[in-house]
Amino acid sequence: MRFLFTVQGEGRGHYTQALSLAAVLRKHGHEVVAVLIGKSDSRQIPAFFIDKIGAPLFEFDSPNFTSFYKQKRPNILISMANNFLRPFVFKDSLQFIKHKIEELKPDKVINFYEMITGMAYGIYRFDKKMGIEMITLAHQYVLLNPHYKTTAEQDVKFYFLRMLSRINSTRASKILALSFRDMPGSKKKKIVTVPPLLRYEVLEVEPVRGDYVHGYMLNAGYFDEVLEWHKKNPDIPLRFFWDKKGAEEVTHVDDNFTLHKLSDEGFLRSMAGCMAYATTSGFESLCEALYYRKPTLMVPVHVEQEFNAYDASLSGVGISAKKFKLNKLIEFIPQYIPDEHFREWVHQAEAMFIKEICG
């Protein structure tokens, strides 16, 4: 079968999920004909994705979160206003997706939580007019599963995320909800619970416990927080990764604090060899930390990552905080108890994805 991928281009997780699924599909004789990436000008496609995806890449403008105050937490109201003021740009993006689907004529479209693609299916109805189904996948779709229970307070907090998830999955023939643990799906809502899509490289690395804290900052504004903590605790080595545009491959703050441009192998090696992990709570890296049994501090940047952190805490991934207070992470290390069932759940992924996507 021939597949077209559409990917939300914010953060690292959707890219690594696309790499993982592409490898699984090719292993079973299928083809990824192209990858369409919806992103803003403030983000750049990671070099590791460009090098490894093995398919033509095309970019288009897509709604994104806008950071404010030293590039930390995104402001939802500012984000919505900014995106509302760009209807003509997004109209061009809708036309671009329509043109690519009509040109490439894939057997199916796989949507990695990209909004414009969901809107395009709602408007142009490719499934009905061309027989091209869309399968969409992301962790956020767990929130649409009636078996996933949240409190009234969380229902308010995650309302926007649920709404976004419904838009992104418009006319989807199947919704694959990536989950830290197994749970029933919903046939009525076309939801299937599936394991995380960890790459073969993750599964092949054997973790060890090092003496440093490994970290990932989605927004560069958190650097000041980490630097402030490091000045008070200079003896604890820190290796942090970021996607700051124009940054050097490695920025040496001092002998015990380095900042690395986001890379594939380097990030995994650092994760596998650390004593603990501090992150802005992307789903994929939380799964990698859980797979490697690494105590984790989660500092959510936006509502999507707040949900990731909440759900991850239910599986014992780690603890949450509003700032990179690494002393909390250091104190948590002796209390950490890894989830012994997670690896078994992850190892079911390949068979489940082939069944649900190609069956």
Image (cartoon, helix red, strand yellow):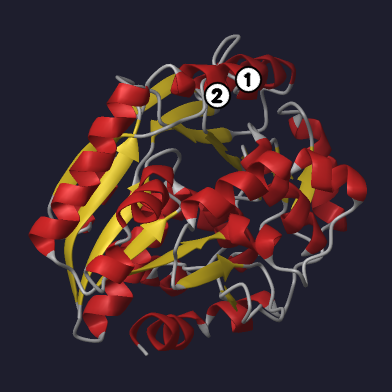
- Residue most extreme to the top: 69
* CA neighbours of label 1 inside 10 A, class few (<14), some (14 to 19), many (20+): few
Q: Quadrant of the C terminus?
A: bottom left
Separation of residues labelled 2 and 1 (CA atoms): 5 Å
Q: Secondary structure at mark 2?
A: helix
Q: Is residue 212 above or below residue 189?
A: above
Q: Is residue 22 above or below residue 268?
A: below
What residue sits right under mark 1 in the picture? 77
Residue at image point 89% right, 43% down: 153
What residue sits right under mark 2 in the picture? 80
- The kind of residue tagged 2 is Met
The reply to whether residue 285 is in sight is no
Left or right placement of residue 127 versus residue 214 in this view: left
Quadrant hosting residue 230:
top right
* CA neighbours of label 2 inside 10 A, class few (<14), some (14 to 19), many (20+): some
Query: How many marks overall?
Result: 2
Residue at image point 37% right, 43% down: 116
Locate residue 358, reporting x and y percent.
Answer: 33, 85
Locate residue 298, reporting x and y percent.
Answer: 70, 42
Locate residue 80, reporting x and y percent.
Answer: 55, 24
- The kind of residue tagged 1 is Leu
Q: Secondary structure at mark 1?
A: helix
The reply to whether residue 240 is in sight is yes
Locate residue 110, reporting x and y percent.
Answer: 34, 64
